[in-house]
Image: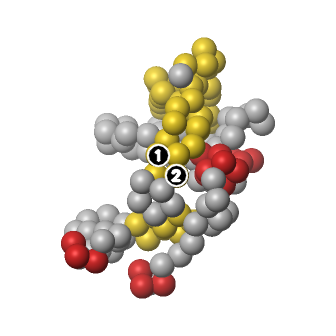
Amino acid sequence: RALGRSVYVPYTQGRWEGELGTDLVSIPHGPNVTLRANIAAITQSHRFFINGSNWEGILGLAYAEIARPDETLEPFFDSLVRQTPVPNLFSLQLCGAGYSGNDSQGPATVGGSMIIGGVDPSLF
């Protein structure tokens, strides 16, 4: 749902801007929850990630003070914790085999893992 509001996010190097909206986000594996979250459609960027890298978006996982463009917006993870029983904790495995979440499929072949609401000691 479009909110008719522009958003601008500067970083130490680079920036992006776009149009703000909200949408229902479902996380079917792990916590199995649905929440309403702020979503920004990025319309312009400069030195945001690597130009030409075909990135598809950014997810607000940082502390609210640095993850939001102003004090009226709630970052994704803050919305997740407020609207669901998910604990205020997540962990990332940035490289390695990854986590399939299904032992019968074996480990994922590329990438890393994000564990929402906790940690998985088997990944380190």
Which residue type carries mark 2? Val
Q: Is residue 19 visible?
A: no
33 vs 69, nearest the viewer: 33
Kind of element beneath mark 2: strand
Q: Distance between the Cα atoms at labels 2 and 1?
A: 6 Å
| In the image: residue 64, left or right of residue 51 | right
| In the image: residue 64, left or right of residue 54 | right
| Mark drawn on residue 33 | 2
Where is 61 relative to 25, above or below? below
Residue ranking furthest to the right = 71
| Mark drawn on residue 42 | none
Kind of element beneath mark 1: strand
Which residue type carries mark 1? Ser
Q: Is residue 106 visible?
A: yes
Q: Which residue is mark 1?
A: 26
Specify the quadrant of the image occupied by residue 86. bottom right
| In the image: residue 53, left or right of residue 116 | left
Where is 6 relative to 109, above or below? above
Q: Residue at x 64, y 59 (%)?
A: 85
